[in-house]
Amino acid sequence: MLSKSIAQRLHSDASKSDASKLSRRRFLQNSSAAAGTLVIATTIDFLPAVSLAATANDGPLPNAFVKIAADNTVTVIIKHLDKGQGVATGLTTIVADELDAEWAQMRCVFAPADAKLYNNLFMGPFQATGGSTSIANSWEQLRKAGAAARAMLVAAASSTWNVPEAELVVEKGIIRHTASQRQTMFGAMAAMASTLPIPADVKLKQPQDWIYIGKDVPRIDSIAKTTGAAVYAMDVKRPGMVTAVVARPPRFGSQVRSFDASPAKAIKGVVGVVQIPQGVAVLAADSWSAIRGRDALKIDWDDSKAESRSTAEIFDNYRARAATPGLPAARRGNLDSAFAGAQRIIEAEFTFPYLAHAPMETLNAVIEMKSDGGAEIWAGSQFQTVEQATAAAILGLTPERVQLNTLWAGGSFGRRATPNADYVAELAAIAKQTAGKFPIHLMWTREDDIKGGRYRPLALHRLKTGIDARGNLVAWQQRIVDQSFMVGTPLEAMVVKNGIDETAVEGAADMPYAVPNLSIEWHHASSPVTTLWWRSVGHSHTAQAVEVMIDELAHAAKKDPVAFRIALLEGHPRHVAVLKLVAAAGEFGAPMPRGRGRGIALHESFNTVVGMVADVTVAPSGQISVDRVVAAVDCGIAVNPDVIRAQIEGGIGYGLGAALRNQITLTNGIVDQSNFDSYEPLRISDMPKVEVHIVPSSTPPTGIGEPGVPPIAPAVSNAIFAATGKRLRSLPWDLNLLKS
């Protein structure tokens, strides 16, 4: 997912006070009616002025976030992708509460691609989902939209009944005047309300008056997904549509030198073979024919610029780099003097492999060229602005001529958020090469995703730390070597500062621990292997290195790991509160039977603080069982606690799978893994019992989609040490080291 640092760079307001940020937001001073529908819209003043001319349209309207129809349904226009994380429910909840609607009347649809109107407010005029920002950036925007719609409905009822607005009560989708015993539903007032001006200012509810916010509201997508009514890109069928698959190079960085398409064209059902920049595409009447045709292709690959090293060779190169100073990402104090005066110095190496995202729904999308020369695309789109613009550029169109329909997505974990819109670019290139002859469904197979996708970068951390005679942490040097996926992209200027990619060092360079003498350094290691943010981005490896080392230092100092951390967290009350809560709830410090251990970890990512306590059992064979995980989370106001718990549980499962066994390895540049047999996801039998404790908060919501991942590996690593006395620093864990 998009990293916190990018979100902050793209929208400077994210780091400013709430009061300052809120003062710059306002409502458009107009409203529009469409077929008796009340439409409410909001915008931000750094955007250019936009004229909103409503048309009779049953679909989403430009910049309309709330649509109340004559049939009494309330539709919330969702500008973000819901890929299973529950933002459609959360965003709809925000509107429903301020509107005082009945949950049963709430609906949602995805917004069209339009960066000027549906931008992520933390990213400027850029429509995107990432960085765990969906709820956070829409919180005030949708509260005001809901409150404005309510005020206009009340004004309409007041005018119709000729009674003061103050005498009207709104509850569960009904407007009621108690004195005259009159009442009506929203739909009856929608047409009149749509003719009224949007209030210049609205009064938002106080927390004690919330009906849905902070409660376990049922997910709005559950029924549709259970019955199969929810539409994914895999479900889209267009008249005359063909399926396309692409033969991509076996080594990253290879190019097509030549190919023979005749064997593929001989396969029944194959209707075309075209070369595109990414490889060779085979089009067929169905997916099986397309895959068989691709398998029959004879391609001569040019490997002259390809990655040809094996994983061990890459790590050897990283170790050599880590032995030398890197670019300074954070620095304070006098490290040399601190090490000279330290009573004990502890050094350690942490390694992390490439990781695939492996969402359950593989990448796929549909394109259809229109009779007017435009194009229409259906996809689980995460970066609508990038994908629309990329497709348009390839097809020789303006972005407005490409209609991009966002659909539900079956997972992403960052994979759909590519700065170059890779799979949509492939789709557009195939459409261009076939001159729009037929609608095309591009499909990636599981093997395509595992063997040739974009990975969490392989990384190596080299740490040198020192404690004084009183057991205080006095020196910390951390050198990180990994590959930047920002360098060479349009986002480089915003994220790479003084040569340092912030996504590579986040979680280390900005660690909350007050180490007086500290140096965080970074080496950029380039490779043709394509990499990308992976759920929790840099935090996915920095949390492991930092929290395992902190635990090791506490034990070396003969101090309680919780007390050791608290002493270093002065000025971070949120962290201390989360740490104390999770330690108490997880019974950290209580005696454990032989062969069992309990570990703790604390980490902040995406402005959310999460602490975890993990209980493990280690068998004499070295096999481990993660029995229980207790988590505490401070993510600001909890819009939907059930969704928050689900995201923490999901993050634990995702991070635990990576720590137990997931890795992408190379042999002479070729990926060894290909499907779930060799890149095995976490099994339900591996999933521990999870308890999630949410810290009550009155501050605006912060991220929740990703913060559950970083603390799980270090918490379990520290628990393994507690059970065995052995440190497993690198991921995935080498359980052979635990054999008795």
Image: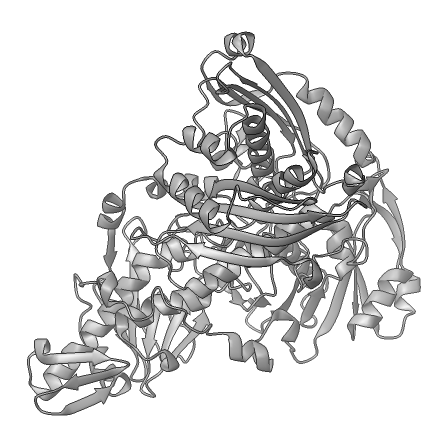
Q: Residue 372, position in %: x, y?
A: 54, 71
Compared with residue 15, is residue 287 higher up or lower down, i.e. above or below?
below
Compared with residue 298, is residue 612 higher up or lower down, i.e. above or below?
above
Q: Residue at x 65, y 34 (%)?
A: 483
Residue lying at the far bottom in this picture: please name it: 181
- Whether residue 485 is visible to the viewer of this picture, yes or no, is yes
Q: Residue 461, position in %: x, y?
A: 64, 29
Question: Residue 117 falls in which quadrant of the image?
Answer: bottom left
Towards the viewer: 721 or 461? 721
Question: Residue 159 falls in which quadrant of the image?
Answer: bottom left
Towards the viewer: 110 or 225? 225
- Where is the C terminus found, in terms of image quarters? top right
Count of marks, rendered view:
0
Q: Residue 173, position in %: x, y?
A: 28, 81
- 739 displayed left or right of 194: right
Q: Residue at x 66, y 71 (%)?
A: 234
* Colour pattern of the rendering: one colour
Q: Residue at x 41, y 69 (%)?
A: 216
- 84 displayed left or right of 306: left
Towards the viewer: 123 or 730? 730
Q: Residue at x 57, y 40 (%)?
A: 489
Q: Residue 94, position in %: x, y?
A: 34, 66
- Whether residue 510 is visible to the viewer of this picture, yes or no, is no
- 501 displayed left or right of 351: left
Towards the viewer: 517 or 263? 517
